[in-house]
């Protein structure tokens, strides 16, 4: 009777959010390459599966700027 209705976002909104997160991770890889990712290939293709690794490296080696990017990636 008094059931709470939870609406799921449309599939296009979820897809757009995932794509935006992936683009942010790719940009972070480029921006922080010398500081965080120097031991990896500079032309590495960052996929959705790599986002936790990007987050970890930014937390460990990215300084304050890296933490701010992590905040955006983990939303």
Image: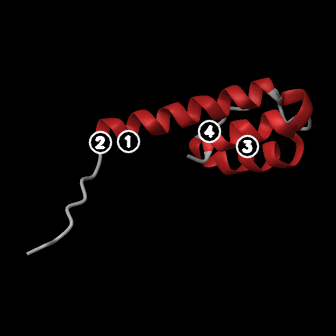
Mark pair 2, 1: CA separation: 5 Å
In what quadrant of the picture does the N terminus appear?
bottom left
| Residue that extends furthest to the front in the rendered view of this protein | 2
Q: CA distance from mark 1 to mark 3?
A: 21 Å
Picture quadrant where residue 11 is located: top left
- For this orientation, the residue located farthest to the left is 1
Secondary structure of the residue carrying tag 2 is helix
Q: Residue at x 82, y 29 (%)?
A: 32
Q: Which residue is mark 2?
A: 11
- Which badge, 4 or 2, is on the more N-terminal residue? 2
Which of the two labelled residues, at mark 1 and mark 3, occupies the earlier sequence position?
Answer: 1
Residue sitting at x 91%, y 32%: 35
Label 2: few (<14), some (14–19) or many (≥20) C-alpha neighbours in 10 Å:
few
Report helix, strand or loop for mark 4. Answer: helix
Residue 58 position (above or below residue 20): below
Give x and y (percent) for residue 63.
87, 39
What count of labels does the image hold?
4
Q: Which residue is mark 1?
A: 14
Q: CA distance from mark 3 to mark 4?
A: 12 Å
Q: Residues within 10 Å of mark 1 (few under 14, many from 20)?
A: few
Q: Residue at the location (66% across, 43% down)?
A: 71
> Does residue 42 lie above or below 58 as drawn?
above
Which residue is identified by label 3? 54
């Amino acid at each position: 009777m008094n059931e709470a209705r939870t609406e799921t976002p449309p599939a296009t909104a979820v897809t757009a959010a995932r794509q935006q997160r992936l683009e942010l991770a790719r940009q972070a890889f480029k921006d922080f390459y010398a500081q965080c990712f120097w031991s990896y290939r500079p032309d590495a293709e960052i996929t959705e599966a790599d986002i936790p690794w990007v987050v970890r490296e930014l937390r460990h080696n990215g300084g304050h700027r890296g933490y701010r990017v992590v905040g955006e990636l983990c939303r």
